[in-house]
Image (tube, helix red, strand yellow):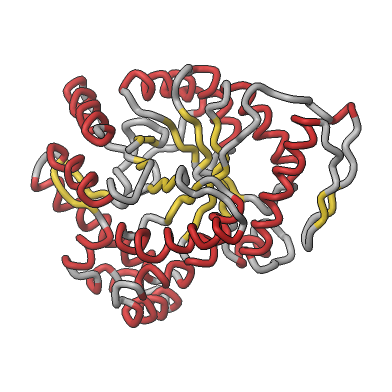
Amino acid sequence: MRVETLLPLGKVDPGVRAPEVPLDVTRVFDDARTVERLGYDGIAFEECKEDPFLLAALAAQATTRLRLSTAVAIAFPRSPTSLAMTAWTLARLSGGRFILGLGTQVRAHIERRYGMAWHPAGPWIRDYVHALRAVWRCWQTGEKLAFESEHYRLSLMVPLFDPGPIAHPDIPVHLAAVNPIMSRIAGECATGIRPHPVCTAAYIEQVMLPAVHEGAARADRDARDFAVAIKPLIATARTEAELAKRREDVRARVAFYCSTPAYRAAFDFHGYGELARRMSVLSREQRWEEMPGLVSDEMLELYATVGLVDDIAAKLRARYAAVVTDAEVSIPIASAADLETLSAVIRALQAA
């Protein structure tokens, strides 16, 4: 299992909260080098409060080994040709270490945050990825740009805007997914999926991966090396007292996710569909304080990996090793001893 982390290093409640302090972009260069020294396989950059592509460029310059992933960038507000160039530049800069992780976002954000017309996300992202690849083929092989689909018509590429071939043109594309429809589409056109944190190992194995293979077969593609990269929900600490606080943090996060209709399939699968509908009502009524109390300990342990730092690697491997190729893990560090502990966790997760 390959292991990624998020920045800012050491300022994240593992798998539960956004960073406690804003990311200091002036430290990305140094922090990326620290991540590489710690033994991580890669860094994943979210598109929340900073541009993930700019951060990936900084990390590419600072490191020589780390894989650099967007996890995830929102596809639709960017034209395929524009994003194709960004990814092409990062692939060149990193020497082929860049992975393009894309998400579709929900309708409200596309319409009201980005000011765009909404279209069904599955067919739209399929067209998007095929359009990206058409542009990349044009640049790499000189093939005429002639892509036409329901959503995009691309037919113009002049020498002034053609960056030409690069040494590592096969840029991996991962799609964020929860339901079998998006998993099937990823199997058709992508090289990996990034399941939502509430997608349990059983759900990935029994629902998402069969859909991936169905999509790959439909497109006559080989899915044997298909990546499954997840940011698991983790509650961990060094003492039982600290762990008790982390458990309640992650319980609240599970409650929030349970209230979100876009993630309903992952709760239906385990028999929590009715609770998810009840949570949705409570969230619409802004009765947030009532929601965590509805998440039982059994439910919490199903959707989150909970344990002391010394035990967390073994628990994560037992849960995910059979179905996940990449795990995004962040554990706070405050001392040299913490760094040694974190390195041990990373090595344990990477063990064959």
* Residue at (31, 22) in percent of width and height: 38
Place of residue 217 in the rendered image (x, y in percent of width and height, measured from the top left):
55, 58
Q: Is residue 70 visible?
A: yes
Dividing the picture into quarters, in which one does residue 330 lie? top left
Residue 198 visible in image: no
Quadrant for the N terminus in the image: top left
Quadrant in the picture for the C terminus? top left
Q: Is residue 276 above or below residue 14?
A: below
Image coords of residue 251 (percent x, y): 25, 61
- Report the residue that reaches farthest toward the left: 240
Left or right placement of residue 116 versus residue 156 in this view:
left
Count of numbered badges drawn on the protein: 0
Q: Is residue 91 left or right of residue 311?
A: right
- Nearer to me, 239 or 162: 162
Task: State the image coordinates of residue 228 (x, y, percent, origin top left).
Answer: 42, 48
Q: Residue at x 30, y 76 (%)?
A: 272
Tell me if residue 250 comes above or below residue 43 in the rendering. below
Identified at 42% across, 58% down, the residue is 209
Front position in the image: 174 or 111: 174
